[in-house]
């Protein structure tokens, strides 16, 4: 059993990729983890011009790249699992949160357009993952007027990466975005909300706003969305374990900590 938010709901077997050859070798899929079919990941790791150094060179250390969206309920459900892995493995593995652009372009619109689906999904999501959606978030869903747009919170995460010069704090930042939206019902397109989260990471208001409105930040954010789409990331969350020129999709959709950790440890060999 698994849960994910995606464009097509597709799933497939676990695959390991040789980025020098672009050829997959199939491995036995793990129970409870629904995995996405992946395209040629070589294009992503060797050719994309991004603010993240790890995208333009072979990984020096093992890397777990977390494809997510700040407006993704299943990502909120998966976030405690990922944070536990982060605390357990961050000294040995690099963690990167990569926004995938779930609600952009023609998908931007009032929450009410998706309210029926959300109301139906919440009980199952809470039961499976153990997270709780706050009363303010439920009120916002009921009201339905809030405009959903993945770009502002995704751009805020890119601001952090550009400020730090690396991706080391992006996973906790992603967790804070998800908590703000789903546990507390805050509007992640509200600059005041993003500034409050940024302040926890020592990003002062003037510097944050300057970078947030920088055309380069907008371009980097869009490039990240495009890269995720080009390599076949169609569902969120998706977790990729990368080692040198090889990457393995270890999880797509929600899965228990024990199952994901087992997949990662197996992938590390």
Image (tube, rainbow, N blue to C red):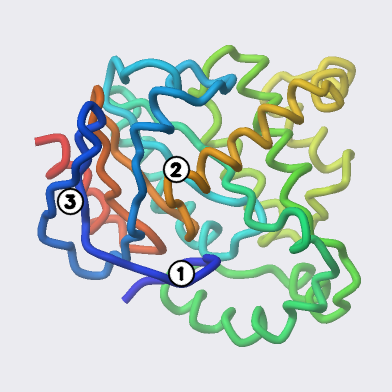
Q: Which residue is mark 1?
A: 130
- Residue 81 is situated, as x and y percent measured from the top left of the image, at 39, 53
Q: Residue at x 29, y 38 (%)?
A: 241
Give the camera-side residue of 109 and 1.
109
Q: CA distance from mark 2 to mark 1?
A: 20 Å
Quadrant for the N terminus in the image: bottom left
- Residue 65 is situated, as x and y percent measured from the top left of the image, at 41, 37
In this rendering, position of residue 127 left or right of residue 265: right
Q: CA distance from mark 1 to mark 3?
A: 20 Å
Q: CA distance from mark 3 to mark 2?
A: 17 Å
- Residue 152 is situated, as x and y percent measured from the top left of the image, at 78, 42
Q: Residue at x 50, y 75 (%)?
A: 125
Q: Residue at x 55, y 66 (%)?
A: 7
- Depth check, mark 2 against mark 1: the one in front is 2
Specify the label residue 66 is tagged with: 2
Q: Which residue is mark 3?
A: 262
């Amino acid at each position: 059993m698994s849960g994910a938010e995606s464009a097509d709901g597709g799933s497939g077997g676990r695959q390991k990729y040789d980025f020098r050859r672009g050829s997959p070798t199939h491995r036995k899929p793990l129970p409870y983890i629904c995995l996405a079919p992946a395209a040629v990941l070589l294009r992503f790791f060797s050719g994309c011009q991004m603010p993240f150094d790890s995208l333009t060179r072979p990984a020096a250390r093992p890397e777990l790249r977390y494809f997510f969206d700040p407006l993704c309920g299943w990502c909120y459900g998966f976030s405690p699992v990922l944070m536990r892995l982060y605390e357990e493995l961050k000294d040995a593995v690099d963690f990167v949160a990569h926004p995938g652009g779930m609600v952009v372009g023609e998908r931007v619109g009032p929450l009410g357009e998706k309210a029926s689906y959300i109301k139906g999904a919440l009980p199952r999501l809470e039961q499976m993952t153990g997270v709780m959606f706050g009363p303010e978030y439920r009120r916002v869903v009921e009201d339905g007027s809030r405009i959903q747009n993945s770009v502002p919170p995704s751009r805020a995460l890119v601001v952090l990466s550009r400020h730090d010069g690396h991706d080391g704090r992006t996973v906790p930042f992603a967790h804070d975005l998800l908590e703000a939206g789903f546990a507390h019902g805050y509007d992640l397109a509200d600059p005041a909300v993003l500034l409050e989260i940024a302040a926890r990471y020592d990003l002062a208001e003037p510097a944050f706003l300057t970078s947030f409105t920088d055309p380069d930040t907008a371009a980097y954010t869009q490039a990240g969305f495009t890269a995720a789409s080009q390599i076949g990331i169609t569902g969120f969350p998706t977790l990729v374990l990368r080692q040198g020129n090889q990457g393995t999709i270890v999880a797509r959709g929600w899965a228990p900590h024990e199952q994901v950790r087992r997949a990662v440890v197996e992938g590390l060999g």
